[in-house]
Amino acid sequence: MPVSELTDVLRKLSQQTTDAAKPAAMLAGTVTSASPLKIRISQKLELDADFLILARAVTEYRTDITPSGGSRRPYTIHNALKIGEHVLLFQVPGGQKFVVLDRIGEG
């Protein structure tokens, strides 16, 4: 194996080791677009839906509820993110995906 190839392999292994040792990051972001979803986490970095995994707390979903003394009924929970909302994100190790956990701040 030529020295240049060996150097490249060692560099990649070193980077993988460094990446694996990084602790998970918690970040705050601001919703800049609801559809399609975009969240800004810094002046220079805005994430689109390809990089986001949404927790149920920040989505619209259907569930069944049984009111006191009543029968089970389906309801829609309108909890989708809106422009201007502040959110808490967890950066998945490796840095390519972010889990949107919940809203933060006023709400």
Image (cartoon, rainbow, N blue to C red):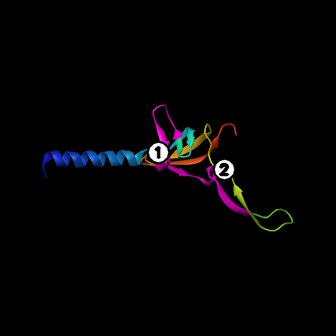
Residue annotated with mark 2: 79
| Residue 70 location (% of width, % of height) | 84, 66
| Residue 103 location (% of width, % of height) | 63, 43
**CA–CA distance in space, label 1 to label 2:** 30 Å
Total tally of numbered discs in the picture: 2
Q: Which mark is residue 23?
A: 1
Sequence-wise, the earlier of marks 1 and 2 is: 1
Which residue is pictured at 26% across the width and 45% down the height?
A: 11
Front of the two marks 1 and 2? 2
Which residue is pictured at 53% across the width and 46% down the height?
A: 36
- As drawn, the residue found furthest toward the top would be 43
User: How packed is label 1: few (under 14 Cα within 10 Å), some, or many (20 or more)?
Assistant: few
Query: Range of the magenta residues?
Result: 39-64
| Residue 42 location (% of width, % of height) | 49, 34
Front residue of 101 and 63:
63
Q: Which mark is residue 102?
A: none
User: How packed is label 2: few (under 14 Cα within 10 Å), some, or many (20 or more)?
Assistant: few
Q: Quadrant of the C terminus?
A: top right
Amino acid residing under circle 1: Pro
Which residue is pictured at 82% across the width and 62% down the height?
A: 67
Labelled pair 1, 2 in contact (Cβ < 8 Å) = no
- Reply yes or no: does residue 90 show up in magenta: no
Q: Helix, strand, or loop for circle 2?
A: loop
